[in-house]
Image: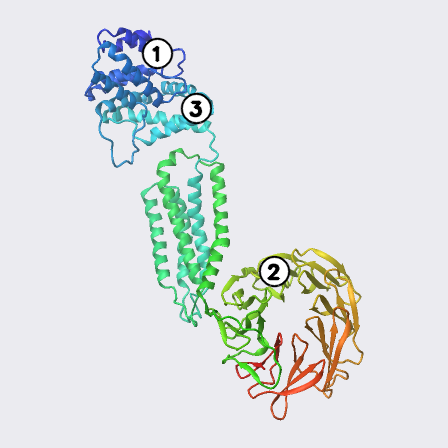
Amino acid sequence: MAVVALGERWNELIPGSTTLADDLVARYLGRNRRAFRDQYLETVLTGLESLIQLSTDPTSVRLAAWFHRAVHEPGGGAAEDAESSARLAEQTLPAYGVDPIRIAEVARLVRLTGSLSTPPTDSYAPPRRDANGDVLLDAVNATLATAPARYEAHAHEVRRDSGDRATAIERRYDEVRELLDGHLYRTQLARQRMSSMARDNLEAELAGLDSELPAPWRGWQQAALAAMATFGAIAATVVAIAAAGASWQVPALESETGWPPVVLAAFALFSAPALFRCARSSTQRALLVSGAVVAVAATGLLVAWAQVPVTNPALGVGLRVPLLISALLLLLLAGVAALVGSLLRTRTARFLPSRNRGQQLAWLAVPGLIALALLLIVQPLARNYVLDSNERVEGGVRPAGEFPRSTLDGKVAWASRELAGAGAEEAVGTKYGIAIPRQTGVVEMFDAATGELRWRYTRSDSDEKPDIYATGNGELLVAEFSDIGYLLLDANTGKRKAAWPGRTRDHAIQQADPLLTREDVSKGSNKLRGVDPDGRERWTFEPGNCTNIGAVASQDTVVTFLGHECGREPDEITGLDLKTGKKLWTKSPSDMYRRPILVGAVVVVAEPAGDSDVPAALVGIDPRTGDTKWRWPVPRDWACRTLLNAAGNLLIVVDCPGPATRVNTKTIVTAIDTTTGLTAWQSTAPVDPRTRVAVTTDARVTSLTRGTAGCLANIITRDGYRQAPLPEGITCARDPRAIGNLILTSGDNTIIALH
């Protein structure tokens, strides 16, 4: 029956071609075919007859319809079938006297059926009209507009023909989506007659495929954009609120208002739900709302950038500047995400499952990524922007001179220029000179040989005197600025090499070289940390609650002194490896040692003698093993504070022979060789023991007193005691400072180096 019915449709397209018709019908009825059989050809030919009047060469179109799937291999695609069928027409039709021009047209039309999809509905450049091609392709797509049961059977045959079930479903899913994205039909007549039914059939098939096709990740892009739009606006709100609590410039103007970041925070907060809906909608209104948010954020960025303060030594940029700009960038990102999501929605809405694993993970991952961006990107960038914008370095090109030795002959080696609020007692020695902190947020480096300024580091956002420490064997300088934290400066050039992490701002430097920091916790365990010069922590030591920590470090070992205030646990001394923080040894002395100091390769501690400030003995401890190397008994008649100072391998002990009264005007200086624990030398001098002293590297003990004719320098060495008159201008009331073998004193807002 099928052969007869199809034979009648041939209707002598080519005179004397019954054999050709039978051959073509036999091909569509082949046993190896699972799809595109006789029912398919009949549907195509029926649809063609309703459109044939629109063609310019009906015979060529009809022949092309017969040939377009004449060759088909199971699993073959439309493009492969079309090419093979076109070649069949080119090889077969000449034997039946068909004109070569018509043969070429038939082959061309058959090859067109290799792609049945049409341009998308939003194309602004419609394809060139091809009457014969349009009619043929619409006839082939007539199979899409058959009765639902017949269409379902055809779709099932097509999927079965594709081989592996999972592959067939995925392939068919992509084909159906591609068809639905276009017009389906090219001619207006076909659209009117078949478009509605075809679209219903395709969407029904797509829904069925969607239920069979695993879609654990489909739609994650749309969900990620919606999440970015929502949480980006929320993040902008948080950053804008933080900006409201910061100043726009430093020092802040009294008239400076906080309403701009507050308004931005409110706008971003109310934008979050609106952008969420926009990212999930394809309406014109969603595009307008998203675009409006983008425009507001972009305008705000331009205005904020134009209003950034111009910095100078007295005016700096406040933290509000980078925070406000960051909030506007986040809002801009949220608006762009909503806009892109809305545009993407117009193409993918009908194909998205309600929810799946990919969408759920996107909603979980995006806020986490935004939070990480705030912590790891926005916050560091804002801090670095403020640090970079508010710092200046002047000088730093002059080579450093060598440190001289003060002979204390009553002359001045050099005097610095006027330094308001600075004194010699705050000077820090480095490899490249003498660093002085100043009250206006300034650190200056002076040449040790000449007193000339080598470089000046200035911060516009600080007007308080920083605390400075030399580290890295004198190569580096750590400066602690109020409300900024620790900054690492190159001691040679003054350039900032690093800023310590913000969480270290409240940590106290226990020892500068090598670096140890201590964190005292009101509730919980105090901590001791081994720190690199750039502020990165190598290790943390937590001895437990209610424990006071003291520590001193050699080049490879940290010796900690732990005083337990809770319970009955005895006090301890513990050795830690300097690089790793690994515990090396622990011991519990009967009395907790005090005043630890590193001298040479030995840690010297004071063994307490009851309530007296004078220790019972001085003890030398090997820092690596904790073993006691020697014990030096303190004479019982000593009655003062027993100052301990290092001078190379010598421990310089400054005390007074009793009694500890103001009438006592004697000072005794003892040098102990820390390698043996034996006394190297001892000198007594008629100097007030309460006077502050400076100890040089070569073991000279110097103090200042006021004489009848002016300020005098008291020098105590192994050779005895001598006094040297000092020039005018030196303030005796301020403490001297020894840096190496150079003695510094203070004048009226100057630093004076003694010759």
Q: Quadrant of residue 44?
A: top left
**Vertically, is 557 above or below 123?**
below
The amino acid type, in three-letter code, at marker 3 is Ala
Mark 1 = which residue?
27
> Where is residue 334 drawn, in percent x and y?
40, 49
> Where is residue 687 drawn, in percent x and y?
70, 86
> What secondary structure is marked by label 3?
helix
**Vertically, is 158 above or below 730?**
above
Mark 2 = which residue?
531
Give the foreground label among 2 and 1. Answer: 2
Q: Is residue 168 left or right of residue 71?
A: right
Q: Is residue 303 left or right of residue 18?
A: right
**From the image, which quarter does the N terminus lie in?**
top left
Q: Earlier in the sequence, mark 1 or mark 3?
A: 1
**Residue that sits furthest to the left in the current view:** 56
> Where is residue 14 drawn, in percent x and y?
22, 10
